[in-house]
């Protein structure tokens, strides 16, 4: 009788034991890292002189002061050509149920940080300097 309760109406197990975490092949942290890595690779390929030796770090969150009104999504270290992306604010504070929008948002932050590193606008990294 106890097995009948687990197998309601003969349908078998209705969900995986791991839940939705591994449904898409990895955790959200793994997906975040892959999106960042591909955006960084693109930037390095297309801007080798300025950003070929750029480093990208992913941290969970920035240090937030008591009187802070804004949570950083990224920061830069010009002296070491490093961009730092803060995963939790990007994923949790700017939410979307659409995976494509989420990817675009993450890539936007990578381009924004890389552009700030060399004193350009993000669209200049995407489209180049000339608009022809």
Image (tube, rainbow, N blue to C red):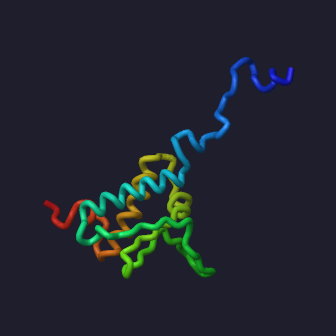
Residue found at the very far front of the displayed protein: 53
- Above or below residue 117? Residue 56 is above
Give the image location of residue 115, x and y in percent. Answer: 32, 70
Is 120 on the left-hand or right-hand side of 55?
A: left
Q: Quadrant of residue 67?
A: bottom right
| Residue occupying image coordinates x 23% and y 70% | 49
Give the image location of residue 80, x and y in percent. Answer: 38, 78
Q: Quadrant of residue 113?
A: bottom left
Give the image location of residue 14, x and y in percent. Answer: 67, 28
- Above or below residue 131? Residue 70 is below
- Above or below residue 119? Residue 19 is above
Residue found at the very far right of the displayed protein: 1
| Residue occupying image coordinates x 63% and y 80% | 66
Is 36 on the left-hand or right-hand side of 124?
A: right
Quadrant of image for the N terminus: top right
Number of numbered discs present? 0
Give the image location of residue 127, x and y in percent. Answer: 23, 60
| Residue occupying image coordinates x 50% and y 71% | 72
Quadrant of image for the C terminus: bottom left
| Residue occupying image coordinates x 35% and y 70% | 54
Residue found at the very far top of the displayed protein: 10
Please state which of residues 34 and 104 is positioned toward the viewer in this rendering: 34
């Amino acid at each position: 009788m106890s097995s009948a309760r687990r197998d309601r109406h003969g349908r078998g197990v209705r969900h995986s034991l791991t839940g939705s975490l591994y449904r898409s092949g990895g955790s959200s942290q793994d997906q975040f890292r892959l999106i960042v890595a591909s955006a960084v690779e693109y930037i390095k390929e297309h801007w080798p002189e300025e950003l070929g030796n750029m480093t990208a770090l992913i941290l969970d969150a920035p240090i937030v002061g008591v009187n802070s009104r804004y949570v950083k999504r990224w920061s830069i270290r010009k002296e070491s050509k490093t961009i730092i992306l803060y995963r939790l604010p990007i994923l949790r504070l700017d939410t979307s149920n659409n995976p494509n929008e989420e990817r675009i948002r993450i890539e936007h932050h990578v381009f924004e940080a890389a552009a700030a590193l060399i004193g350009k606008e993000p669209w200049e990294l995407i489209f180049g300097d000339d608009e022809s």
